[in-house]
């Protein structure tokens, strides 16, 4: 009896404490579920089993923001604003330093490759369902980001996010990103674009555009988009050079009578023509310009400089 007990104790000393591989999978999943999203990126690099568990676990967050600045990139997995992973260029070698809170590590990848590799892990998780995905980019980085998301899509993964916001993107790269979002799941499109050349006709023919519910375009003037291509949206924020009477009539008869319409904010560079407002509301008078006025179920407001029209 004593000899058997001694043998068992000796065996326990040799084998050491239990490892993850000795634990029931249910226990491993519970432990991983308590690890914060940022730490999971590091934990999945420990071994293949942990990588498989993490890749099969709900990520535990609904918000992602990526800042692809030239000298330092950042990745947020929460909208609180603190605790981001920072990827900064090394001054004396071609690699970068990855930092979060008080921890840092120098790696051989470029800062852009490093952040996109971590982002790929997040996006490829089949259970990822985001409420909002924000990408702030430089001109140089936006091209590589589009190539990255194209590679992700070719592996069979489309980006599942309800809202996407693209900040400082050329129009061709806006098309490249939107075309790899999940149509139907994407509801809200927002982008700041600093050029007006090309691709807008392709964007408005995307299923992602046609099936979205909200649009907010900043920076560029939407004079090359027929006004009716906005009418399937419930919420509209755009800039026009001018609004014609014929387009105002379309807004009155089609957009404002649709069951899904909620509001439209339209900035008109050349100002709001009184004839346009009369087309929407025959009872409109110029002296009412700064006061809200109603037509049907909607309220109209014009800004003090008479270049913003709000249909609420």
Image (tube, helix red, strand yellow):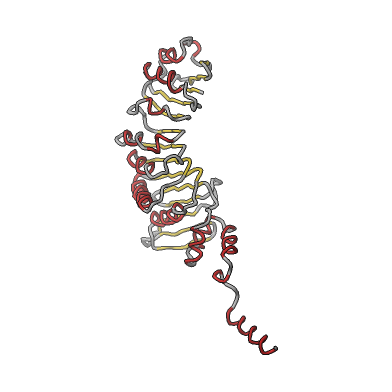
At x 40% / y 38%, what residue is drawn? Answer: 208
Quarter of the figure with the N terminus: bottom right
Number of numbered discs visible in the structure rendering? 0
Tell me where residue 15 sits by quadrant.
bottom right
Residue visible at 47% across and 63% down in the picture = 105
38 in relation to 272, above or below: below
- Is 288 rendered above or below residue 239? above
Lateral position of residue 271 relative to residue 290, left or right: left
Residue in the image at 51% along x and 52% along y: 84
Quadrant of the image occupied by residue 210 = top left
Is residue 296 found left or right of 172 in the rendered image? right
Name the spot of residue 153 as percent of width and height, x first.
37, 50
Residue 238 location (% of width, % of height) = 42, 29
Q: On the rendered structure, is 24 left or right of 92?
A: right
Q: Foreground residue, 133 or 258?
A: 258
Please state the horizontal and vertical placement of residue 9, each as a whole percent of the image.
Answer: 65, 83
Residue at the far front in the pictured view: 1
Seen from this angle, which residue lies furthest right? 1
283, above or below 298, in the image: above
Residue 43 in the image, given as x and y percentages of width and height: 51, 63
Q: Residue furthest left?
A: 198
Who is closer to the viewer here, 185 or 275?
185
- Residue farthest to the bottom? 3
């Amino acid at each position: 009896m004593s000899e058997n007990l001694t043998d068992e104790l000796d065996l326990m000393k040799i084998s050491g404490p239990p490892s993850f591989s000795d634990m029931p999978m249910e226990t491993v999943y519970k432990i991983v579920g308590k690890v914060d999203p940022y730490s999971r990126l590091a934990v999945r690099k420990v071994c293949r089993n942990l990588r498989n568990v993490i890749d099969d676990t709900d990520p535990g967050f609904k918000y992602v923001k990526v800042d692809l600045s030239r000298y330092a990139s950042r990745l947020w997995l929460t909208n609180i604003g603190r605790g981001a992973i920072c990827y900064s260029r090394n001054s004396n070698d071609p690699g970068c330093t990855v930092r979060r809170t008080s921890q840092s590590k120098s790696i051989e990848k470029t800062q852009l490759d490093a952040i996109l590799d971590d982002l790929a892990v997040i996006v490829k998780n089949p259970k990822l369902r985001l409420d909002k995905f924000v990408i702030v980019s430089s001109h140089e980085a936006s091209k590589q980001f589009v190539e990255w998301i194209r590679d992700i899509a070719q592996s069979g993964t489309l980006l599942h996010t309800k809202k996407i916001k693209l900040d400082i993107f050329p129009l061709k790269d806006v098309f490249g990103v939107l075309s790899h979002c999940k149509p139907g799941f994407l509801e809200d499109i927002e982008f700041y674009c600093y050029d007006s050349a090309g691709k807008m006709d392709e964007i408005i023919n995307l299923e992602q555009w046609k099936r979205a519910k909200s649009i907010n375009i900043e920076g560029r003037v939407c004079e090359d988009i027929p006004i009716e291509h906005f009418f399937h949206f419930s919420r509209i924020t755009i800039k026009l050079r001018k609004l014609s009477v014929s387009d105002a009539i379309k807004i009155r008869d089609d957009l404002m009578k649709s069951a899904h319409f909620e509001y439209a904010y339209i900035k008109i560079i050349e100002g709001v023509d009184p004839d346009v407002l009369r087309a929407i509301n025959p009872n409109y008078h110029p002296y009412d310009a700064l006061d809200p006025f109603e037509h049907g179920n909607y309220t109209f407001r014009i800004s003090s400089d008479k270049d913003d029209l709000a249909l609420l």
